[in-house]
Amino acid sequence: MSPVRRYIRSFTVRASAHLAYALWRDHATLAADFAPGVHAVMHGARTRWRVECEIEPCSWETVCTADVPGRLLTWTTVTSERARHSWDFWFAERADGWGTDIELVVVLEGNGAPGSDVAPEVGNSPTDLHFQHKVECPGGDPLLDPDPEHALDRLILLWQARLAQSP
């Protein structure tokens, strides 16, 4: 059975739900936030992702599975040689007018992330599962980072700062 890692983050951005939604709906811009070597090309509901790794470039395709402007955005892999992943964003404007509360659920499933030859290492407990990358890839993307927790936290801080500066 493939290992499944689930990461849940709740955070607030200083922007409307529609502006926050638009940031994540534009996968080309979103890819640039992950890391310099991550690129995305959208074709309707599908997005082709490409990562320029030092040793072995990789790619995968995602499809948008739910798209409700300003409320919900989800996508999942439809092609990947090494792993499946999904991202769910839930948007709710705050009653106090301060911004938008967002819940993000990221699920990484498989023996490795797209773009890496990965070997699982099990720690002291069944939930203590982490991955060591054998391919050097740009950091920042939770799919490619050996520490997805850190990568997600970094992305959230970046997105909060970007949205705080938006008109």
Image (tube, rainbow, N blue to C red):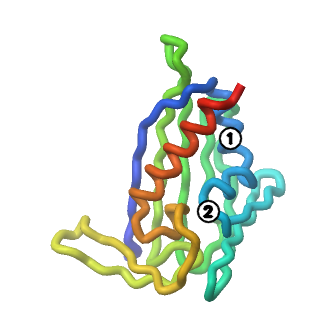
Relative depth, front residue between 167 and 113? 167
Q: Earlier in the sequence, mark 2 or mark 1?
A: 1
Q: Quadrant of the N terminus?
A: bottom left
Q: Position of residue 108 (x, y in %)?
A: 47, 63
For the view shown, which residue lies furthest in the top direction? Answer: 96
Question: What amino acid does circle 1 point to?
Answer: Leu
Residue holding disc 2: 35
Residue drawn at the location 75% of the way across and 57% of the way down: 46
User: Residue 18 at what x, y percent from top left?
Assistant: 68, 28
Asked if residue 5 lies left or right of residue 108, the reply is left
Q: How many numbered marks does the figure carry?
A: 2
From the viewer's side, name the closer residue of 60 and 12: 12
Q: Which residue is mark 1?
A: 23
Q: Does 17 appear above or below 150?
A: above
Q: Secondary structure at mark 1?
A: helix
SS at mark 2?
A: loop
Question: Could you tell me which residue is drawn at 39 percent across and 62 percent down?
Answer: 5
Q: Which mark is residue 72?
A: none
45 shown above or below 12: below
Q: Residue at x 51, y 73 (%)?
A: 113
In which quadrant will I find the C terminus? Answer: top right
Q: Position of residue 138 (x, y in %)?
A: 58, 71
